[in-house]
Amino acid sequence: MNSEVTYSIVVPVFNEEEVIAVTYERLKKVMDKTGRPYELLFVNDGSVDKTAQILSQICQQDTNVKLINFSRNFGHQIAISAGMDNALGQAIVVIDADLQDPPEIILQMIEKWQEGYEVVYATRKERKGETFFKKWTAAMFYRLLRSITDVDIPVDTGDFRLIDRKVCNVMKNIKEKNRFVRGLVSWVGFRQTSVEYVREKRFAGETKYPLRKMIKLSLDALTSFSHKPLKLAIYLGFLFSSLSFLYLLFAIFERLFTPYTVPGWTSVMATSLFFNGTILTILGILGEYIGRIYDETKDRPLYIISSKAGFGRGGESHE
Ligand code: UDP
Ligand code: MG
């Protein structure tokens, strides 16, 4: 084991055959400038295109490159976690494979790290080449998350960040299944600071985060860092019982003191629809939490590695 590695760059990769070679070149160029030993740790998250072959070739040519292949697609957050578990560096940087996070920013992060910060996250000043829908939902999401959690999770900040070995060791011991890594990094504390950057357009290919994965990520974030949605039931229940009580007084008054016999269909329909909707929503929220409790109790491994390359001294080893 070469424990003298200073920097580990963790790159989660899912179907990035069009960019991965360029990403490697750019990362190599930047990291060579540091003059310190480093490793580029690619986590192939079950790609079904040529990503695995390209990476395995790069890995054979460059002893600084390591590769972990998952047995299937486990998701971005899990891929990052696997990278952290296997990184050897004193400082670990997580970066997307699509060059939206410019590798050159890593040097600025390293400077901050050398000043003594243990977490350096990169905040997006601007996002280029992303749809209005994505930018808007992302902006709303970060603000909602911030307003309902007790953890100070910075807004407009993705997983592009540097963490110190100490922080990485703590992260390795957090075994949550439905993980929101950037939230966990905020949660663990330590000395944190940020650098600003402009998020570039994707170099090539398409986003690997369809709406489905975005929703999963935001639900993971909200449920793992807040119990407020559960409390919604109490607040809504209280509000509606007070309103219904007022309505009841009104109905009794009308029955006793006025000549109208109210057919009542409209109000019955309205309340029934409204309450059924509310109840279903709250059942859904409960379901989200219960599903996650179930995931935790199953205690399955976070990910399954089908093969590794570049670990140890140059040669390939398979697990
Ligand atoms: N990614 C991954 N597994 C997935 C989805 C994405 O490892 O299931 C990787 C992807 O290859 C990229 C990073 O996570 O390196 C961010 O994904 P993407 O750029 O598609 O997301 P976006 O920038 O559009 O939010
Ligand atoms: Mg991207």
Image: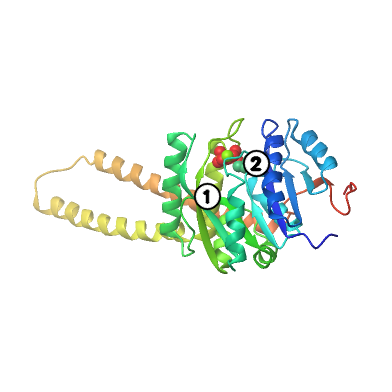
Q: Residue 97: which numbered mark, if any?
A: 2
| Relative to 182, 279 lies left or right | left
**CB at mark 1 closer than 8 A to ligand 1?**
no
Nearer the observer, 122 or 79: 122
Upstream in the sequence, badge 1 or badge 2? 2
Is 196 located above or below residue 59 in the figure?
Answer: below
Which quadrant of the figure contains the N terminus?
A: bottom right
- Residue 316, how many percent across, how many down? 89, 46
**CB at mark 2 closer than 8 A to ligand 1?**
yes
- Residue 145, how many percent across, how many down? 45, 55
- Residue 308, how many percent across, how many down? 83, 47
Nearer the observer, 145 or 12: 12
Is any atom of residue 296 visible in this view?
A: yes
Q: CA distance from mark 1 to mark 2?
A: 24 Å
Residue 298: name its quadrant. bottom right
Residue 276: name its quadrant. top left
- Report the residue at 44% width, 57% height from top: 146
Label 2 Cα neighbours within 10 Å, binned few <14 / some 14-19 / many ≥20? many
- Report the residue at 52% width, 48% height from top: 218
| Amino acid marked by disc 1 | Leu
Nearer the observer, 267 or 66: 66
| Amino acid marked by disc 2 | Ala
- Report the residue at 44% width, 42% height from top: 137
Q: Residue 188: which numbered mark, if any?
A: none
Q: Quadrant of ligand 1?
A: top right
Q: Residue 219: which numbered mark, if any?
A: 1
